[in-house]
Image: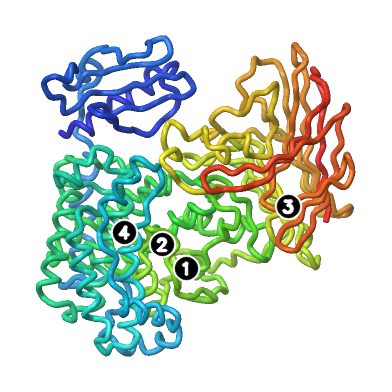
Amino acid sequence: MSAPAAVEQLLDFGESTYGMFFTGHKPTQSFERYLYRHYPETGVYLGVAVSVIPGDGLVESGVYVMGGEFGTVPKYVGLLADYVTPARPMNSVLPAAPTLSAVYVAQLPSAPKGAGAPCSNRAAWALATAKVTAITAQADAKLGQSFPPWNEGLYMAWRTSGLHESMMADRKGWLYSLLIAECAAWQGKYIPTINTVLRSLATQPTWIAPSQDHDLQAYNNGQWFMDLMSASMAHELAQTLYMLGDKVDSETRRIVLGALETRVFAPVRRLLTEGIGRGWWLTVAHNWNAVILADVAGAALSVIPSRHDRALFAAMGQHYIQSHLNEYPASGYGIEGPAYWTYGIKHVALLRHRLHESSGGQVDLFASAKMQAIAAFSARIPMSPSGALAPFGDSHVNTSMDRQTSNYVAAAYGTARAWPGTAEVRVNPWFPNDMPTVEAAMLLTESVPLAQGWASTDFGSLGLRNYFSDVGVLVTRSPMTDSIAFAATIKSAGNANHGHDDVGSYAIALDSLMAGDVGRGDYTSRTFSDQRRTVLWINSYGHPVPVVGGRQQVDASTATNTVLSTNFTDNLDEIAINMAPAYALPGGWSLVRSLRNDRVARTIAIQDDFSAFSMPQAFQVPITTVGTWTQLAPDRIEIQHEGQKLQVRIEASAPFFTSGETITDDGLTFKRIAVNLASPATAGWIRVTYSR
């Protein structure tokens, strides 16, 4: 088996057996000859040396530890095989694949098929022209431009600048408008440029993002593996070949199909049949699983000639997508935050759509109560009819639930919202890793099959509240009859691998988000590294949560529900959260955050009560906002944002003072207004009351 797969087993063993050193599950990283994981809580590194060459001074497959009580240099503690006997990974797919594949082999068409109708189906595309005028204008502009060349300097710059580059996304993004414009007109106007773009994309040095190819083994040596960028590239290229058919010249088609086989299908096929390669994404719970499965399976179904080969990739999707769905609790709450609910579930929906079609309706990933609850999340999480929501996890402050994805899942469960409903095809893709041509083809030319065995379910309009009890997240709103919405969302748990240090974080909204959680900025090399918690919009300093005795919260990504009590009536919603476990302070003390939404008084109050400190402690509660603020009085401020105003009253158990600062970190600027008790105390409280 491959060395990386054996290393993963060793590192997992270390976490499960020696949790006092290797706390929680951490991502595997690489540095020089090491594959390793870092545990900031203990300062310890656990790694394995691989591909050792003479002169390195290392032992091949040697296990090394460093940090904490192990010292400041790597310490050899034995061979990998001294601790684990590597087992061939993914054995579960080998017996399952033939059984699952048989369903698809019996139903798959003799020729491959992509999403939606090909451009040659003029009846299906007849109504598209009027819907894609803006996209056609973009395509026309591209005809007078030069296709962006591959720039090795920009690709390599990530290693020094730490910024995620856009060159690869800019090149990939050219296909979308050109393809949709050609399908709408079908006059050959855009075909020459599309052929040029296809050849250039297929032959560029790599499809893998620089942040993922740490050792440049793919870039330099063609050791291909799957990441988000390569999966979406494969899907877009395959979809383009399917939609254009013989309009793609034979040489270009040969080049693209060869690249798809070499860079994507062969490595994944080897994973599934031999257990060799980097296949961690097959079994992780987060969005990588859903994205890569949907894109790779979709690409395979679109272009692979062999029905049996296509069936293997379809079976892969059906078998392994359960890893992603298992991440969601029974309530359906988007555990990675609202932005990544969209990213993950739109790929689940795409995979569901293709597998339903490929199996003749026999396979339906939506045919479960769990999936129905996940689908309903998009209708339950907004705070106002305008769609404002709490930007928990790695969500931007202006994040809203994606209409295409929300309407698809609603239509699948038979709600009143039709597909495509109010959604429109995107003028610009959202993310570098999107597959917009696939989405547009489905949106413009296909209908949504109803979930098998599930009666029509109306997700309904927004009510007074939605409470996700299993994760301790409350959305509490004013009556929908109010002319201006007034609502809050508060959380007690973490957001998995996209989690911030934010136990007890909240958001306050009128028609737009006004105060509280400020979301995320730009992804850089720090974002998913061992420096993640140094980013101010990730650690608790950039969240509206207390600073206790000068200490911030510890890693809250895996924090669990700590709700102490709730009280919900038509006039009043109350929730209390135990926040003490989020701070690395000696036990025996108490910190409780309570939220009270008084619909009669039109106020939402956040109160933090602390007690039982053995020694007096400084205590600070910040108010955060991306808007502007004005001090009206020592105990009153006003927050302004997007033409709306929010009044804030501050009360405390003892004298207090406020201080404000503007913070800019990794692409996000926000205001932090700190409310400080004037003197340290062993017990006390601070209350912040919002009103419109």
The image quadrant where one finds the N terminus is top left
Mark 3 residue type: Thr
Determine the image quadrant of residue 129. Answer: bottom left
Mark 1 residue type: Tyr
Q: Say which of marks 3 and 4 sits in front.
A: 3
Counting other residues with Cα less than 10 Å from the Cα at mark 1, is it few (<14), some (14-19), or many (20 or more)? many
Q: Say which of marks 1 and 3 sits in front.
A: 3
- In the image, which disc is placed on residue 349? 2
Tell me whether circle 3 and circle 2 mark residues in contact (CB < 8 Å): no
The image quadrant where one finds the C terminus is bottom right
- In the image, which disc is placed on residue 408? 1
Judge by depth and name the residue closer to the eye, 495 or 176: 176
Judge by depth and name the residue closer to the eye, 683 or 198: 198
The spot of residue 595 in percent (x, y) is 76, 42
First reached walking from the N terminus: tag 2 or tag 4: 4
First reached walking from the N terminus: tag 1 or tag 2: 2
Counting other residues with Cα less than 10 Å from the Cα at mark 3, is it few (<14), some (14-19), or many (20 or more)? some
